[in-house]
Image (cartoon, grey):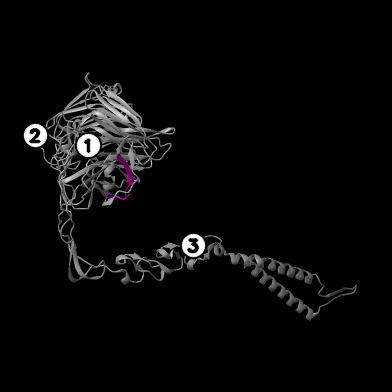
C-alpha cells in the first residue's frame, strides 16, 4: 500500500424492495472500517433507497451514546463522512488488537457493500453479510503479502479462537504458542484484528481457521499485493467477507471477466476430509484432486477467456483471484472475489455504481444463468442484451457480460419467473479493478442435519438434503429427478401488485400556465412478482383547474437569455438567440460558435466581425483583445512602411542642398584691387543684399530639412 496518500472507504448502502426471501439484504449490519495508513483517512458513506423509505439508526464505535438517525427517502442519495478516528488502521506495530465496529440497522431491508480506496491504483470491494448470515466456523483466504484477518462479534461475551497456519515468516514478527492459536472474548460489535500490514515479508495466512461459540462475521485479505509492471511493481489491496462453512457449496461456475488480459487463478478450501474436486477446463479435459482434510487448500490457474466449472464431493469455498501483468495492459491489478455456489443463486439483485474520486471506472455486470433462463433476465426493466457464452463442459449454463452506465446510479436485475441466477459486479480503470458478488442466498446448504420436520415456502432450508435450497415448487412434480415430489418446499409464491401512496399534485404544464393539476402513483407496494397481477385502476388522476408552475417558458425569455426558465445567457448573439437551443444567426464582434450561443472568443491571431480580422497583418503580433483588434504600443506595419519609403528621399534632398550651398559659398562676391598707391574696395550693394538673402534662405532650408528628417 502506498503511504502518505488519502485513504478513502466508500460504503454503499441501498434498499432492496423484494420481500419474502432474504439474500445478502438484512435489517442489521456490524462492520469495521479497515484502511491503510495515509494522510487523513476518511470514510465516505453513500446511502440509497430503491422504493420504500427506510429509517436508519447508525451507532458509531467506542461512543456508547452517539447515534445517527435519519430517514432515507425513496430514490434519494445521502452521503455521510466518517471521520478518521473511526477507521481501523491496519499498519500498527501491535499486530493483535481489538476495536469497536460500526452498527447500522433499519426498519426495512438494505444491503451494504464496502469499497476501500487507498489510492488511485489500490482498491478493494467487500460484500457484507447481515447478522443472520453469520456463522461459527470459517476458513479464510489472504494473498501472499501483508495479510489481515478481522473477526466481528454480534453478541456479548463471544469466545473466538483463531488458529493460524504454521507460517514461519509470520512467527518472525508475532511470537505464538505451539498451537498457533489466538483466543479472545469479544463484546457486542467488537472486532478482533490480526494484521501483518506493518511488516515486510512474504506471509500468507490462507487456510487459517476461525471458531466461535456465537455467530461472527469474518473479513480477510492483504494490505499490499504487488503486481509485476515491467521492471517495477504496482501495489494493490485485496479484501473479502467470507461465507461460514455451513454455506460452502459443491458446484461452481468459474466466471471470466470482460478483459481477457488477466492472469487468473482460484483458491479452493475444503470443509471436510476426503473432499474430491474436479475442474473442467474445457469440454474434453478435466483435472481431479483429493483434499485429504478440512482446511487444506488448492490453487488452480484458470483460463480467463472462457467460463468453466468445478464440482466437489463435499462443500468447498472458492475465491477467484485476478492478477494482471499491467506491463502488457493498463487494466487490472490484484482482485479477489468470492465465488457463489450455484445453489446459493437468487432471482433478483440490486446494486449501486459509486462515483470514486480521481479515478474513472467502467462497470460491468457478469451474469451466470441456466441456458433456458437467459432470455428471461431483465436489467432496469429491459431484457438483457449481450452475447452469451456457454460454460465449458457444462452446456446447461451460460455466462454474459454487459457494461453499465458510468454515472452513480442504481441498478436492478431479475428474472420473470423467479428463477435463480448468479450476478457479479466488475469495475475496471487504469491500473486498478475490483469485483464482488451482487448478492446471494445466506443459506445453510452444508449442514449435517436435514429432513426438517417443518417445511414452509421460502424457508431457505435444504429440506430434502440434496444441498440445494428451495429448488422445488408445490406442483406435484419431481423437479430435481430424485424420485420424490415437492420434498423441498421452496417455491416463490405469486404476488400481485398493489398501489403505493399518491404523489403530490403538480401542474400539467412544464412551464408557464396549465389547465389541470395531476398526481401519480406507482404499482410498488408491492411490485407484482412471479406472474402476479398488475395493479388494478389508474396510475394517475387529474382535476380541471388553472395552475401556474412559476417557471418561464423558453418562448417568453427576454433578450439575451434562453432555455428552461431562461436560466442560460446568450448576450453575444445578434440580434438574439433561439430560445430553445441558444443558437444564433450572428455573433457580436470578437465572438464565434453561433450554434452554441456565441460562447467562444475569437481564436488567436483573429478579431472583429466573424473573426475575419488578421492580427498578423495589423500588428505583426497577436492582438491585445478580440473585438477591435487593438495592437500593442509599437510601430504598426504601415508606419514602418512609410518610414522606410521616405527615408532615402529625405537623405537625397539633404545631399543636394548641401552641395548647392557649398557651391554657392565657394563663388567670389566682390573685387579687391591692391595697387601700390591705394586699396580700393568695390562693394555691390545689391549683390550683397542678394547674397545675404540667399544665405538666410539656405539656412532656413537646412533647418526645415533637418526638422523633417528628425520627425
**Viewer-nearest of labels 3 and 1?**
1
Extreme residue toward the bottom, this view? 686
Q: Is residue 188 visible?
A: yes
Marks 3 and 1, Cα distance to the nearest angstrom? 73 Å
Q: Secondary structure at mark 1?
A: helix
Task: Decide: is 15 above or below 234.
Answer: below
Q: Would you name the residue on which mark 1 appears? A: 343
Q: Residues within 10 Å of mark 2 (few under 14, many from 20)?
A: few
Q: Would you name the residue on which mark 3 appears? A: 624
Q: Is residue 146 visible?
A: no
Indicate yes or no whether the magenta region holds residue 399. Answer: yes
Residue 283: x and y, percent?
35, 33
Q: Secondary structure at mark 2?
A: loop
Q: Residues within 10 Å of mark 1 (few under 14, many from 20)?
A: many
Q: Nearer the viewer, residue 603 or 450?
A: 450
Q: Nearer the viewer, residue 680 or 642?
A: 642
Extreme residue toward the right, this view? 676
Magenta span of residues = 397-410
Q: Which is nearer the N-term, disc 3 or disc 1?
A: 1
Q: Which is nearer the N-term, disc 3 or disc 2?
A: 2
| Quarter occupied by the N terminus | top left
Q: Would you name the residue on which mark 2 appears? A: 453
Q: Nearer the viewer, residue 478 or 382?
A: 478
Tell me the residue at 55%/63% (across/down).
619
Residue 427: x and y, percent?
32, 43
The quadrant where residue 221 appears? top left
Amino acid at each position: 500500500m502506498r503511504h502518505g496518500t488519502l485513504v478513502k472507504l466508500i460504503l454503499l448502502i441501498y434498499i432492496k424492495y423484494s420481500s419474502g426471501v432474504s439474500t445478502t439484504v438484512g435489517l442489521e449490519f456490524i462492520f469495521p472500517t479497515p484502511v491503510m495508513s495515509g494522510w487523513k483517512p476518511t470514510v465516505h458513506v453513500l446511502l440509497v433507497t430503491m422504493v420504500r423509505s427506510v429509517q436508519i439508526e447508525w451507532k458509531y464505535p467506542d461512543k456508547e451514546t452517539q447515534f445517527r438517525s435519519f430517514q432515507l427517502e425513496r430514490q434519494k442519495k445521502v452521503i455521510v463522512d466518517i471521520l478518521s478516528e473511526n477507521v481501523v488502521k491496519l499498519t500498527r506495530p501491535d499486530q493483535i488488537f481489538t476495536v469497536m465496529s460500526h452498527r447500522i440497522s433499519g426498519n426495512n431491508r438494505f444491503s451494504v457493500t464496502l469499497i476501500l480506496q487507498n489510492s488511485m491504483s489500490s482498491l478493494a470491494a467487500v460484500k457484507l453479510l447481515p447478522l443472520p448470515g453469520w456463522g461459527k466456523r470459517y476458513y479464510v483466504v489472504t494473498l501472499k503479502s501483508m495479510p489481515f484477518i478481522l473477526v466481528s462479534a454480534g453478541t456479548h461475551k463471544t469466545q473466538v479462537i483463531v488458529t493460524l497456519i504454521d507460517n514461519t515468516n509470520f512467527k518472525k514478527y508475532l511470537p505464538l504458542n505451539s498451537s498457533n492459536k489466538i483466543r479472545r472474548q469479544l463484546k457486542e460489535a467488537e472486532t478482533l484484528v490480526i494484521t501483518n500490514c506493518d511488516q515486510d515479508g512474504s506471509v500468507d495466512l490462507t487456510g487459517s481457521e476461525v471458531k466461535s461459540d456465537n455467530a461472527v462475521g469474518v473479513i480477510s485479505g492483504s494490505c499490499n499485493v504487488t503486481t509485476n509492471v515491467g521492471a517495477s511493481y504496482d501495489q494493490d489491496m485485496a479484501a473479502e467477507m467470507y461465507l461460514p462453512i455451513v454455506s460452502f457449496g459443491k458446484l461452481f461456475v468459474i466466471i471470466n471477466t470482460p478483459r481477457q488480459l488477466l492472469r487468473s487463478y482460484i483458491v479452493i478450501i475444503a470443509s471436510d476430509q476426503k473432499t474430491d474436486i474436479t475442474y473442467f477446463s474445457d469440454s474434453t479435459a478435466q483435472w481431479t484432486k483429493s483434499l485429504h482434510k478440512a482446511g487444506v487448500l488448492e490453487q488452480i490457474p484458470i483460463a480467463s477467456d472462457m467460463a468453466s466449472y468445478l464440482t466437489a464431493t463435499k462443500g468447498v469455498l472458492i475465491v477467484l483471484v485476478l492478477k494482471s501483468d499491467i506491463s502488457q495492459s493498463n487494466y487490472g491489478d490484484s482482485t479477489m472475489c468470492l465465488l457463489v455456489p450455484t445453489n446459493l443463486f437468487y432471482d433478483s439483485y440490486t446494486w449501486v455504481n459509486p462515483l470514486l474520486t480521481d479515478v474513472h471506472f467502467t462497470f460491468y455486470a457478469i451474469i451466470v444463468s441456466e441456458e433456458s433462463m437467459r432470455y428471461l433476465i431483465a436489467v432496469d426493466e429491459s431484457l438483457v442484451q449481450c452475447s452469451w457464452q456457454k460454460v465449458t463442459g457444462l452446456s446447461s449454463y451460460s455466462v454474459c457480460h454487459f457494461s453499465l452506465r458510468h454515472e452513480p446510479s442504481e441498478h436492478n436485475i431479475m428474472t420473470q419467473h423467479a428463477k435463480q441466477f448468479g450476478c457479479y459486479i466488475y469495475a475496471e480503470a487504469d491500473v486498478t479493478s475490483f469485483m464482488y458478488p451482487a448478492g446471494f442466498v445466506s443459506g445453510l446448504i452444508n449442514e449435517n442435519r436435514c429432513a426438517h420436520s417443518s417445511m414452509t415456502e421460502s424457508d431457505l432450508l435444504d429440506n430434502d438434503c440434496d444441498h440445494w435450497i428451495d429448488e422445488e415448487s408445490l406442483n406435484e412434480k419431481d423437479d430435481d429427478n430424485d424420485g420424490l415430489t415437492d420434498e423441498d418446499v421452496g417455491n416463490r409464491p405469486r404476488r400481485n401488485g398493489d398501489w403505493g401512496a399518491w404523489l403530490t399534485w403538480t401542474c400539467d404544464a412544464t412551464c408557464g400556465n396549465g389547465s389541470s393539476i395531476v398526481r401519480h402513483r406507482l404499482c410498488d407496494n408491492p411490485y407484482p412478482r412471479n406472474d402476479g397481477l398488475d395493479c388494478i385502476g389508474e396510475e394517475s388522476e387529474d382535476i380541471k383547474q388553472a395552475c401556474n408552475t412559476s417557471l418561464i417558458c423558453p418562448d417568453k425569455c427576454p433578450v439575451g437569455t434562453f432555455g428552461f426558465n431562461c436560466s442560460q445567457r446568450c448576450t453575444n448573439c445578434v440580434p438574439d438567440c433561439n430560445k430553445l437551443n441558444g443558437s444564433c444567426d450572428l455573433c457580436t464582434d470578437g465572438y464565434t460558435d453561433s450554434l452554441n450561443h456565441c460562447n467562444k472568443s475569437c481564436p488567436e491571431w483573429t478579431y472583429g466581425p466573424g473573426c475575419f480580422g488578421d492580427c498578423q497583418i495589423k500588428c505583426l503580433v497577436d492582438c491585445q483583445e478580440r473585438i477591435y483588434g487593438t495592437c500593442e504600443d509599437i510601430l504598426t506595419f504601415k508606419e514602418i512602411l512609410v518610414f522606410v519609403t521616405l527615408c532615402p528621399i529625405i537623405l537625397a534632398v539633404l545631399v543636394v542642398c548641401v552641395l548647392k550651398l557649398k557651391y554657392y559659398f565657394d563663388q567670389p562676391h566682390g573685387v579687391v584691387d591692391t595697387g601700390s598707391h591705394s586699396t580700393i574696395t568695390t562693394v555691390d550693394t545689391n549683390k550683397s543684399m542678394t547674397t545675404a538673402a540667399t544665405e538666410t534662405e539656405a539656412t532656413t532650408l537646412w533647418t526645415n530639412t533637418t526638422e523633417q528628417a528628425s520627425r
